[in-house]
Amino acid sequence: MKVEVNSQALADAVAWTTRVIDARPATPILAGIRLEAIDGTLQLSAFNYAISARHHIEAGVDEAGSVLVLGKLLADITKSLPAAKTYLSTDGSTMTITSGKSTFTMQLMPESEYPDLPVVPTKLGQVDSPTFAQAVNQASVAVSREENRPVLTGIRVQFQGDKVIMSSTDRFRLARSSFTWTPEDATISTTALVRGSLLRDMARSLDEHQNVTIDFDADNPSLLGFENAGRVSTSQLIDGEFPAVDRLYADEYPIHAVINKQALIDAIKRVSLVAERNAPIRMVFSGQELTLSAGTADEAQAKEILDIDMDGEDITVAFNPSYLVDGLSAISEPFVRMKMTTAVKPVEFNGQQEADSDESMDYRYLLVPMRFNN
C-alpha cells in the first residue's frame, strides 16, 4: 500500500473511526483499525462486535492495498503530524507514516484474524442533522447508568410513518422527544432499542450540514445503521423489553404553572447549594408565586421566590435538584410549563415559546417527586 492524504483529514477520520475501539478490547485484534487504499480513497473501519464505524477520505493511491494497525496509537500519531500532507507506505510487516520531517513506523497486525464488519441494513429514512441531534440530546437525559439492566441504558426509537419518537427512563424520570422525518416507506411502524451512549456520541460528531440517514431492516431487527457525511456506524440493538412507560403520562393535569426557564434553573442551582447530597429541593406553588427552598433548620438553609403564571390548586412538591436541572436544560424554548396532579405523582415538563402560548409536545420530561419532611 502506498498513499498520499491530507494530514488533517486523516487525523479527523482516524479519531472518528477509532472511538469505537474499547479501552480494553475483548480480544487484542479488536484494538486494530483497518485501512484500505482503493479507487482514489483511503477507507477506514473499526469494530468491537457491538458497534462498527466506517469512514473514507480522498487519497492519492499509488499502490492499492489494505492493512491493520493499532487504532489508538495511529490516532495519537495522526493528530500530531506537522505537515499538510502525509504519506503512508507498507513494507513487509511495517507501515511507515511520513509527514514533513517526521517519520513513524508501525507494526502491522494479522489482518486475516480481523472479524468481518456487519452488513449495513437497508435505508429506513432520513432527517436533518440539527433535528436529530436535538432529539437525541433530549431523549438521552434519562438514560440509566445501571449496566446490570441493559434495557435502561438504551433509548427506545419508535418509527411511526413520518414520526420518530425517542424515549429513555432510569425509573425515576422519563424523557421523550419526537420529530418528523422522511421515511422510505410512509407506512413504516417498527421499534428499536439502541445504546444511549452510542446515540449521544453520534449526535456530538455529526456534520450539521448533511442529513442523517437511518438504516434498519424491520424483518431482521438486530442492527441499526447511521450515515452522515460519508461516515457510517452500525450498532447491535439491545435485546430486551423496554418498560411500559406510556401509562405514566396523565390524561389530564389539573395544575399548570408557567415559569421562565433560565430563571428557574438559576434559582434551583442557588438554592440547592445548601442541600446535602441526594436531598430534595422543595417547590411551593401558591397563588402566582413559586417558593424554592432547601436545607434543614439545624444546618444551612436557602429560599428563593419566583413569579409564575399558575392555574389550579396550591401544591408543594420536592425533587432531586440534579434531575430537575437536567430536564429543564434539555428544553429548547425560553419558558417551561410544569403540569401536576398530586404531590407524589409524576410531574410533566414541557417547553413553550411565549409565557401565554401553548406548550410544545415535541419534548416531554416526566419526573417523579421525592418525599420530604415539613
Image (cartoon, rainbow, N blue to C red):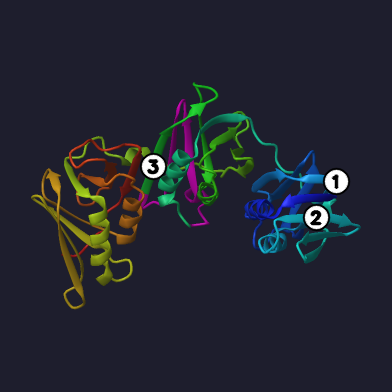
Q: What residue would you read off at disc 3?
A: 176
In primary-sequence order, the first of circles 3 and 1 is: 1
Residue at mark 1 to residue at mark 2: CA–CA distance: 10 Å
Circle 1 Cα neighbour tier, 10 Å, few/some/many (<14 / 14–19 / ≥20):
some
Give above or below for 170 relative to 212. Answer: below
Callout 2: SS: strand
| Numbered label attached to residue 88 | 2
Residue extent of the magenta highlight: 146-173
Secondary structure of the residue carrying numbered label 1: strand
Q: Residue at x 74, y 50 (%)?
A: 5
Q: For the residues marked 3 and 2, what is the alpha-carbon distance in whole angstroms?
A: 46 Å
Q: Which x, y percent locates residue 53?
A: 66, 47
Q: Is residue 174 left or right of residue 94?
A: left
Q: Please name the amino acid that badge 3 sits on.
A: Arg
Q: Residue 232, located in which quarter of the rendered image?
A: top right
Q: Residue at x 32, y 57 (%)?
A: 325
Mark 2 is on which residue type?
A: Leu
Q: Which residue, given by chain and number where applicable, does mark 1 sit on?
A: 62
- Mark 1: amino acid: Asp
Rendered view: 217 above or below 37: above
Of labels 3 and 1, the one closer to you: 1
